[in-house]
Each structure stands twice: as structure tokens, then as C-alpha cells.
Amino acid sequence: MSTPGRGLHGHVLESLGPAITAGEYPPGSVLRTDELAQRFDVSRSVMREAVRVLESMHLVESRRRVGVTVRPKAEWNVYDPQVIRWRLAGADRPQQLRSLTVLRSAIEPVAAGLAAKFATAEQCARLTECALGMVANSRGHQLEGYLVHDVAFHRVILEASGNEMFARLGDVVAEVLAGRTHHEVMFEDPDPAAVTLHVQVAEAVREGDGERAERLTREIAVGALQELDILAP
């Protein structure tokens, strides 16, 4: 999964990427690199580097004698963390959040069940530490602190599943959780029931109870969808 670099081409990407994902340049639109270089006041080489990153995300494709063409949305790399971030910053945020949360609800309960079977002692300890960190930041409007532990918790679940495909979704889940927090699609304090469920999932994984770990994680996912119904209808 690609991450925009820093510097001049990173600056271009932070303007052009969100514009593409927001539909300001509809599929089929042709972007002239020389015109864009003038607009952003950068060299053509910088512009070409930005285009290469956008191509790696499947947002655009370069065609000889045509230019840089915006690709259909169905071809975008929707699992790319930066594409997720850009889309969450746009008008289709509710739809994007729901789509990603449904994905999580399909994957994470299974991952938790597997984690109960395959997690190492060190992973169990990290999971418990993350859950306790969530508890410690669950009151007093400490959403940024809570987010750090929440992201880490779900990364451990995916990694501890022993499935490398699940583990690679850690960045996707991190962007979803960060997007909910940064775009205020969260209550001022996390739902106490959800916090407790995370603690219970950590216990179930440590105890090797896969069925319970899967069921509890599914409850977390259902709760997240219910929050979206209220905060991002």
C-alpha cells in the first residue's frame, strides 16, 4: 500500500488526491501534467513523481498522446490507506465509513477467534495492555489517547490471527478508527459498553476461548455500525 512522500510532490498529492476522490475530476478526465505543474508551481519532474504515486493507487493512468486520465472508481485501490483517508475527508464519508465498518465486521470477529488459538504470550500481554489503555483514556474527552490504544488493539488482533492477509488490513482499520475520531464521528467519550467488550475480548483471547472472542468482537462491530446510524446517517 502506498504512502505519499513528503516534499513538493507530497504537497501536490495532498491537493490533487482528495480532488480526484471527491469527484472534482470525474472518471475519464484528462489531467495535463504541464498545466498542473504550473498550477502547483512545481517542476515537471515533481509532477511526474506525484502522478506515479497516483498511478500506484490506480486513481489515474498515463496514456501516450493523451495525458493522465482519471480511472473509474471501481478500479481504485480502495484498500490503500491514503485513498481511504482522502475519501473520509470528502462528501461520501458516511458511505465510506459504513463500507469499511462492514468490512471490519466480516473480518475482525474471525481474526479474534483465530487469535485465541494462535496468539503468543507476548501478543496476549500486548492485547491486555491496549485494552487497559483504552480504559484509562475512556473518560474526560481523551479521544486522541484512546485512539492510540484502540488502533494498537485491533492491529494485535489481526496479527495474532496468524493469517498474513488479515494482518495486512491493520493499516485499513487504523485509517477507519482515525477517520472516525478526526472527523468527529464519535461520541465525546467512547461507549462504556464497547470499552468493556475490548477488555473481555483480550481475556477471551488469553484464555484461548475462540468462540467467545469471535462473538464479543462481533458485538463491537455491531455497536460501531449502530453509532454510524446515529452520527453519520
Image (spheres, helix red, strand yellow):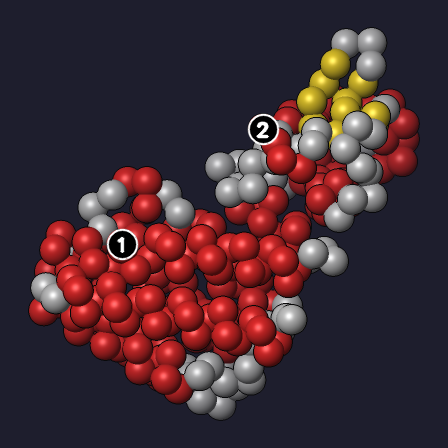
Q: Quadrant of residue 51?
A: top right
Dot 1 or dot 2: first in sequence order is 2
**Figure quadrant of residue 106:** bottom left
Q: Residue furthest bottom?
A: 140
Q: Amino acid at mark 2?
A: Ser
Residue at x 32%, y 46% (from the top left corner):
167
Residue 111 — which label?
Answer: 1
Is there any visible trace of residue 156 in the rendered image?
A: no
Q: Nearer the viewer, residue 230 or 68?
A: 230
| Residue at screen point 23% across, 77% down | 200
Which amino acid is tagged 1?
Answer: Ala
Tell me, for residue 196, which label it has, or none: none
Residue 186 drawn above or below residue 63: below
Give me the residue at 9% from left, 69% from top: 207
- Where residue 18 appears, as percent x and y from the top left, is 72, 47
Residue drawn where x is 58% and y is 49% of the image: 84
Q: Which residue is mark 2?
A: 56
In the rendered image, which quarter is residue 157 located in? Answer: bottom left
**Mark 1, residues whose alpha carbon is within 10 Å: few (<14), some, or many (≥20)?**
many
For disc 2, the neighbor class at 10 Å (few under 14, some 14 to 19, many from 20) is: some
Q: Position of residue 165 (x, y in %)?
A: 32, 40
> In the figure, 25 relative to 33: above or below?
below
Give left or right: position of 122 versus 198.
left
